[in-house]
Image (spheres, coloured by chain):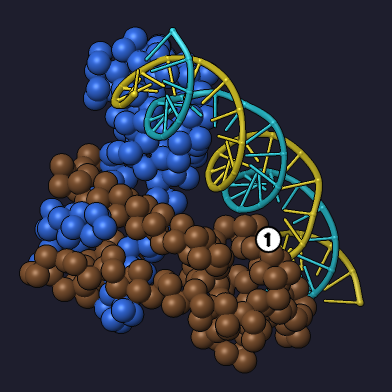
Chain colours: A brown, B blue, C yellow, D cyan
DNA sequence: GCCAGATAGATGCATATTCATCTAACAGCC
DNA sequence: GGCTGTTAGATGAATATGCATCTATCTGGC
């Protein structure tokens, strides 16, 4: 069944909003000499996992990474000294990732830029909408 | 100024929704042996422009393409016989793009898949929200 | 134990993307 | 006309991505 004009407009708006804002944020970070936005997702996911560490395949799902893509990104990040990996002893195919002190520091530096950018781009909704509601609405679209 | 939890949640939801839905759509098209989603944007923009044609730099802005990226994408699409280009006579640096019969046909084939996917993914909002409102809210975020 | 899947992650190769730079054409000024 | 700066688009080289395939390990059935 074909979409209504309103559904199509929503899809177009969703794409334009995400793409344009993401683009601005990513280039601002780059201009500050910091790593791309996607690195932040990884650092933050692993930092929140604390000492338990995090396994690549878990991140793959929650952050929507292509497997091979994540595999290589992690290698780069380990190479930069932001992460460290160890063998997961209960299943020796697996790896466990932990963030290093340098990784924490870089994440904080990124947040100094990234945080304000989120506020800047997310605050100006028309007064009749709460960010929370729009987030709920968007999340309701994720599932099928 | 740092973001509130709600602003951050909105930004995360915006990314997850766009990325996950886009991913599903793009791979469905591929599975049907059709070109990627981004080709649709180009075909549709040019088809709507009719005989007047469209210039690359105009598309660059409205569809948020990287200049070099669009340049090469257009070359591929011309190579596939979906578009044709001619020199823009009023400014001979420029090009004018027009869609071919084959291009129209491919766009229609893509729409047979793409249209229903938009409906499928955009219809199930909680009843208190209209797609139109959410689109307005998202569009209001685009500007800064 | 042994075999047939399944799963975690790595990798080769083709393709796409980015960045910086280049060329050609234009526009304004003297 | 000649010069300077700007803009449209192309391109080389480095990097990233996607896809298919590979290896190693695990799991379950027998």
Percent coordinates x, y for residue C30 in the rendering: 34, 24
Badge count: 1
Quadrant (top left/top right/bottom left/bottom right) for the C terminus of chain A: bottom left
Instruction: Give the residue displayed 39% in from the left and 24% down from the top.
Output: B106
Percent coordinates x, y for residue B138 in the rendering: 22, 58
Instruction: Give the residue displayed 67% in from the left and 77% down from the top.
Output: A83
Q: Answer above or below: position of C3 versus B51.
A: below
Quadrant (top left/top right/bottom left/bottom right) for the N terminus of chain A: top left
Percent coordinates x, y for residue B25 in the rendering: 40, 46
Q: In this view, does D29 lie to the left or right of A16?
A: right
Instruction: Give the residue displayed 34% in from the left and 58% down from the top.
Output: A21
What's the chain of the residue with tag 1?
Answer: A
Q: Nearer the viewer, residue B38 or C18?
A: C18
* Residue A120 lies in quadrant: bottom left
Q: Nearer the viewer, residue B35 or A41?
A: A41
Percent coordinates x, y for residue A8 in the rendering: 22, 44
- Tag 1 secondary structure: helix
Instruction: Give the residue displayed 33% in from the left and 80% down from the top.
Output: B2
Q: How crowded is mark 1: few (under 14 residues within 10 Å), some or many (20 or more)?
A: few
Q: In this view, does C21 lie to the left or right of B88?
A: right
Q: Answer above or below: position of B125 versus B39.
A: below
In this orientation, does residue B109 appear?
A: no
Q: Answer above or below: position of B75 versus A100.
A: above
Q: Is residue A127 left or right of residue C16?
A: left
Considering every residue shown, the one lying at the far bottom of the view is A51
In this orientation, does residue B70 appear?
A: yes
Q: Mark 1 points at which residue?
A: A72
Q: Is residue A50 left or right of residue A62?
A: right
């Amino acid at each position: 069944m074909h979409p209504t004009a309103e559904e199509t407009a929503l899809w177009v708006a969703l794409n334009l909003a995400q793409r344009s804002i993401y683009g601005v944020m990513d280039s601002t970070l780059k201009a500050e000499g910091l790593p791309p936005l996607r690195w932040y997702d990884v650092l933050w996911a692993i930092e929140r996992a604390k000492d338990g560490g995090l396994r690549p395949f878990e991140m793959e799902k929650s952050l929507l990474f292509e497997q091979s893509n994540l595999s290589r990104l992690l290698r780069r990040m380990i190479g930069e000294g932001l992460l460290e990996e160890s063998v997961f002893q209960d299943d020796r195919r697996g790896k466990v990732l932990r963030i290093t002190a340098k990784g924490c520091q870089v994440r904080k530096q990124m947040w100094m830029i990234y945080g304000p950018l989120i506020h800047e781009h997310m605050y100006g909704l028309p007064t009749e909408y709460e960010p929370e509601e729009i987030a709920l609405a968007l999340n309701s679209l994720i599932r099928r």
